[in-house]
Image (tube, rainbow, N blue to C red):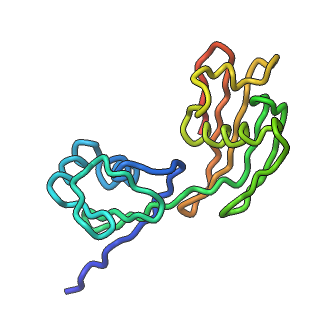
Amino acid sequence: VRKKEPQSREIAISTEWIRLEALLKLADAVPSGGMAKNLIQDWQVLVNGEVCTMRGKKLRPGDRAACLGTTYLVTAMNLEKLDLRNFRNYQSLQSSFSPGVNLIVGDNAQGKTNLLEAVYYLSTGRSFRTRREIELIRFGAEYADLSGAVSGEERKQTIRTVLFAGRKPRQQF
């Protein structure tokens, strides 16, 4: 009789953290939030080697969650390329990034924070500076187009959002 080896999978996230319940659903470990809730409350989920009964537990890159014979390692997605059109003060920007730390430098009012806001918007679907999406569209433009090439968990993906003045954003993945 052969003993079954435990499985391990990397799950890449594009945000700073993910809740335990959401991780289990994202990893297809469970088909529903209700099942995730039951597993967590029944002490069947380990986080970093210890039983965790908090379904809202925040997991960050480097954390591990285990359930039903599989361990899930939370990893970060890497932004490889960012393309902006009519976003804040950028008429057009194409930028590439290296894995790890990237340093963004420039004079005051040149768009450093706008660049970070674009990355944040693609990651979360909202701005950290304003609730009014019309403020994200360059003055005089009808739309803003944000696109990012990301990689993680041995795959590459493009995330794109187009913002229109006075209308809901249209997102394409």
Against 99, residue 170 (above or below) is above
Residue found farthest to the left? 42
Quarter location, residue 85: top right
Quarter location, residue 76: bottom right
Q: Please state the horizontal and vertical placement of residue 9, each as a whole percent of the image.
A: 42, 66
Report the label total: 0
Against 125, residue 30 (above or below) is below
Q: Please state the horizontal and vertical placement of residue 21, each as a whole percent of the image.
A: 31, 48
Residue found farthest to the front? 108
Q: Nearer the viewer, residue 106 or 45?
A: 106
Q: Residue at image x 70%, y 36%? A: 146
Q: Residue at image x 40%, y 55%? A: 59
Q: Nearer the viewer, residue 147 or 117?
A: 117
Q: What quarter of the picture does the C terminus occupy?
A: top right
Residue found farthest to the top? 166
Q: Please state the horizontal and vertical placement of residue 52, each as a whole percent of the image.
A: 24, 58
Q: What quarter of the picture does the N terminus occupy?
A: bottom left
Q: Residue at image x 73%, y 27%? A: 144
Q: Residue at image x 62%, y 50%? A: 157
Image side of residue 96 versus residue 7, left or right: right
